[in-house]
Image: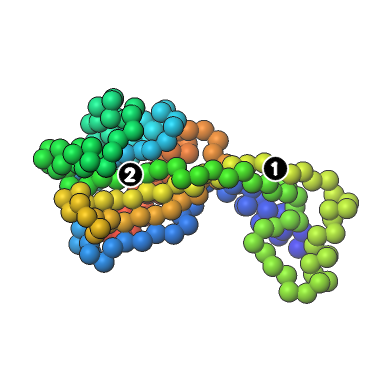
């Protein structure tokens, strides 16, 4: 029994640095929609992460026959470095449409939480025991086995796909929320996140 709990705990620890989809939604207006030319926009104050994300996602979409371009190439530096009005943004959208773009895939960091977890071979989050005896039996080792508390970050990120040829309340095609848990390095974190987006878009038949 102890070996079983050790294996489960090991799986939990190994999965700590990961990308997890929390929820997603696709508009019924776009059952047969597949973008042909996509602008990729990453919204984060980490310029390196933004460029790696946009380049990585561009490569993945291009490999599936979709024309994709990074916002760092398309948008002027002044556009990115100063706050824009809605009118200015709409003007930029119109320019994109005239240049042949039909979609924008935008990803934004919406928040960061600091979390704490206890590391020990008996303390399993997400497991609920229905009687006191089992609960106390499993958790009494806090008195006898040393453990420690881990601080880690959870990044809440949202990705959205818009049809910019329909620039109104029905332009949202798809949206998904993700938690990136305890990112270790920019490259590996972005790689996992981009793969999660590609899987979701493929499952929704939005890309080949």
Q: Who comes first in sequence, dot 1 or dot 2?
A: 2
Residue depth check, mark 1 versus mark 2: number of the one nearer the observer:
2
Q: Residue 150, which numbered label?
A: 1
Residue 63 x/y as whole percent? 25, 41
SS under mark 2: strand
Q: Residue at x 57, y 49 (%)?
A: 15
Q: Specify whether residue 207 is in view.
A: no
On screen, residue 88 above or below 126? above
* Image quarter of the N terminus: bottom right
Q: Specify whether residue 92 is in view.
A: yes
- Is residue 194 shown left or right of residue 96? right
Q: Residue at x 26, y 45 (%)?
A: 104
Of the pair 76 and 31, the residue shown nearer to us: 76
Residue 167 x/y as whole percent? 20, 51
Residue under label 2: 106
Residue 101 x/y as whole percent? 17, 43
Name the outermost residue toward the bottom: 131
Q: Distance between the residues labelled 1 and 2?
A: 32 Å
- Is residue 39 shown left or right of residue 148? left
SS under mark 1: strand
Q: Residue at x 36, y 38 (%)?
A: 42
Of the pair 147 and 95, the residue shown nearer to us: 95
Residue 89 x/y as whole percent? 24, 39
**Crowd tier of the residue under label 2, counting other residues whose Cα lies within 10 Å: few below 14, some 14–19, many 20 or above:** some
On screen, residue 16 above or below 23? above
- Is residue 185 shown left or right of residue 92? right
């Amino acid at each position: 029994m102890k070996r079983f709990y050790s294996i489960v705990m090991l799986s939990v620890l190994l999965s700590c640095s990961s990308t997890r989809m929390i929820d997603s939604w696709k508009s019924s207006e776009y059952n047969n929609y597949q973008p042909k030319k996509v602008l990729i926009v990453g919204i984060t104050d980490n310029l390196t992460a933004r460029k790696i994300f946009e380049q990585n996602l561009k490569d993945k979409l291009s490999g599936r026959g979709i024309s994709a371009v990074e916002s760092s190439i398309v948008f002027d530096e002044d556009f990115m470095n100063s706050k824009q009005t809605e009118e200015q943004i709409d003007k930029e959208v119109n320019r994109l449409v005239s240049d042949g773009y039909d979609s924008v895939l935008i990803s934004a960091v919406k928040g960061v939480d600091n979390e704490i977890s206890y590391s020990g071979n008996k303390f399993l989050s997400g497991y609920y025991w229905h009687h006191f005896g089992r609960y106390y039996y499993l958790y009494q080792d806090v008195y006898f086995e040393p453990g420690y508390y881990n601080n880690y970050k959870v990044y809440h990120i949202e990705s959205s796909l818009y049809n910019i040829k329909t620039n109104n309340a029905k332009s949202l095609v798809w949206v998904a929320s993700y938690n990136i848990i305890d990112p270790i390095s920019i490259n590996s974190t972005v790689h996992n996140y981009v793969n999660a987006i590609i899987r979701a878009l493929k499952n929704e038949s939005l890309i080949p």
